[in-house]
Image (cartoon, grey):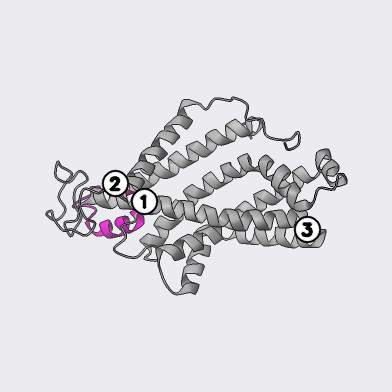
């Protein structure tokens, strides 16, 4: 068992707004998972008329090439979830490692890493992602995930450093050291269980930011290349026909908006559950 500062996630109920966020994310998650096994049509099948409105044959209408938009929305949900999860995973590995290293390090190294975190956080995540994509000279889904993961990592690192230093000042950490417990064991058994809930809130927020950044990269042609149908690419392709067929731009925009809002509502619920004292702040 870790020490006495473990968060008391004590049976605090989330309000209906937070459950709404869970419902939104669950629906989009289900569509993304389902797209691995089934879609109404093949992604690049031009089986409908150009710019058909939503109807029984095409639930979300068709694009300027006659491709089914609902199929593209499902594929876009898959890409958004893969990119968000991948970016958060990479950001968590890099951020937690460097953040703990800073907290455990000497004062000089701690200050140096803290300064690096602050400098990188000053740059927008999208800008860092664009620089990484440009450095690799190849736009792909994997490159977008790597770039966004690197962009997320300074924020995770800074939060990890602050939380870890707070826990290291506790008496039970001193007692563990006196009893002969090594730093790796302290990090694994005392620090990680205490900071995990708060990191979960941060990572949930970064998930939403990563999804938005990926849509922006795809809109600029730096995200997942064709034939991938990301929501950002759908918005870019629909801008020329937005007056003739507004559903082509409205639907992916609404999907992107719903996912980001849903994730933020879930993160807000987690924050209230694990850190009720911080609600007012």
Q: Nearer the viewer, mark 3 or mark 2?
A: 3
In the visual, does 151 lie left or right of 185? left
The residue that mark 1 highlights is: 78
Q: Which mark is residue 206?
A: none
Residue 238 in the image: state x and y as whole percent: 26, 56
For mark 1, give the secondary structure: helix
Q: Which mark is residue 105?
A: 3
Dividing the image into 4 quarters, which one contains the N terminus?
top right
In the visual, does 7 lie left or right of 249? right
Q: State which region is magenta.
A: 231-252
Q: Crowdedness of circle 1 by 10 Å Cα count: few (<14), some, many (20+)?
A: many
Residue 181 lies in the magenta stretch? no
The residue that mark 2 highlights is: 251
Residue shown at 72% from the left, 47% from the top: 164
The residue sitting at the right extreme is 178
Can residue 124 be seen? no
Dividing the image into 4 quarters, which one contains the C terminus?
top right
Residue 52 in the image: state x and y as whole percent: 14, 50
Mark 3 near mark 1, Cβ–Cβ under 8 Å?
no
């Amino acid at each position: 068992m870790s020490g006495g500062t473990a968060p008391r996630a004590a049976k605090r109920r989330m309000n209906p707004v937070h459950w709404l966020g869970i419902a939104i994310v669950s629906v989009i998650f289900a569509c993304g998972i389902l797209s691995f096994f089934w879609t109404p049509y093949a992604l690049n099948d031009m089986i409908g008329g150009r710019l058909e409105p939503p109807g029984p044959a095409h639930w979300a209408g068709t694009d300027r090439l006659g491709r089914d938009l609902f199929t593209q929305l499902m594929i876009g949900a898959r890409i958004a979830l893969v990119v968000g999860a991948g970016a958060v995973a990479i950001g968590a590995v890099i951020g937690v490692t460097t953040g703990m290293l800073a907290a455990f390090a000497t004062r000089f190294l701690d200050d140096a890493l803290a300064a690096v975190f602050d400098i990188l956080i000053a740059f927008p995540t999208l800008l860092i992602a664009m620089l990484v994509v440009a450095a690799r000279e190849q736009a792909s889904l994997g490159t977008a995930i790597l770039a966004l993961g690197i962009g997320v990592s300074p924020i995770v690192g800074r939060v990890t450093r602050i939380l870890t230093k707070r826990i290291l000042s506790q008496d039970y950490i001193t007692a563990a050291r006196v009893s002969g417990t090594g730093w790796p064991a302290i990090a694994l058994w005392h620090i990680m269980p205490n900071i995990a809930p708060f990191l979960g809130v941060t990572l949930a927020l970064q998930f939403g930011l990563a999804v938005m950044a990926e849509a922006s990269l795809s809109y600029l042609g730096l995200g997942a290349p064709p034939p991938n149908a990301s929501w950002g690419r759908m918005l870019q392709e629909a801008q020329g026909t937005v007056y003739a067929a507004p559903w082509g731009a409205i639907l992916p925009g609404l999907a992107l908006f719903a996912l980001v809002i849903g994730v933020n509502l879930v993160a807000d619920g987690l924050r209230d559950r694990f850190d009720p004292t911080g609600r007012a702040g």
